[in-house]
Amino acid sequence: MHLTVKKMTEKYAIEVLCWKYDKPYDFYNNVLTSGAMMELLTNKYFVVLDGHSQLIGYFCTGKPAQVPDGNRSKAYLYDCIDIGIGMKPELTGKGNGHHFFSFVLRFVQEKYSKDIRLTVATFNERAIKLYENFGFERQMEFMREDVEFITMVKNRG
């Protein structure tokens, strides 16, 4: 499957913010608000399109990829490039994650020469397994309200 990256646009932001995941992944559901739109349009958010220009996912880099409560736990002290990803709900749990994440990871590695860090809810075992398959190692756990998160790092070296 041929994939391409484009900058997030208003059209794609609306689509992403309307995605609805099944339980327990509904934790990742968003609400279409002006604040959420501004977040996606003014930060480093990108979309991933398939060969038919259909949106299959998105990702962000930098501070927007961090969970704010992680700063209190000192989860982000180590200098890395943070990434966050989201894949279209209809495509999740069907073996598409490897190709999608491989593409995003390659894109980020070409742009940055730092170690790569991501943050994931610990209940999301299928994502953690995917990241471990790409060489990410568990670093630090922290809580945000009643959800536990873990940072994972892939060393550049």
Image (cartoon, grey):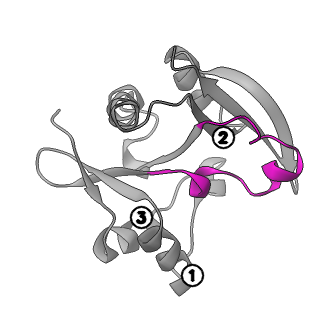
Residue displayed at 30% across by 61% down? 7
The crowd level at tag 1 (other Cα within 10 Å; few <14, some 14-19, many 20+) is few
Q: Magenta segment, which residues?
A: 60-80
Give the residue pinned by disc 2. Answer: 119
Numbered tag placed on residue 63 in the rendering: none
Give how far across and how far down residue 70 sits, in percent. Answer: 80, 48
| Residue where numbered disc 3 is placed | 16
Q: Which residue is label 1 attached to?
A: 35
Sort mark 3 into few (<14), some (14-19) or many (20+) by Cα contacts within 10 Å.
many
| Residue 2 image offset from top left, x and y in percent | 15, 36
The image position of residue 111, as x and y in percent, is 36, 38
Depth-wise, is mark 2 or mark 3 nearer the camera?
Answer: 2
Q: Nearer the viewer, residue 153 or 131?
A: 153
The spot of residue 124 in percent (x, y) is 65, 36
Task: Report the quarter where the N terminus lies.
Answer: top left
* Amino acid type assigned to the residue bearing label 3 in the image: Val
Residue 16 quadrant: bottom left
Distance from disc 2 to disc 1, alpha carbons, whole Å, reads: 22 Å
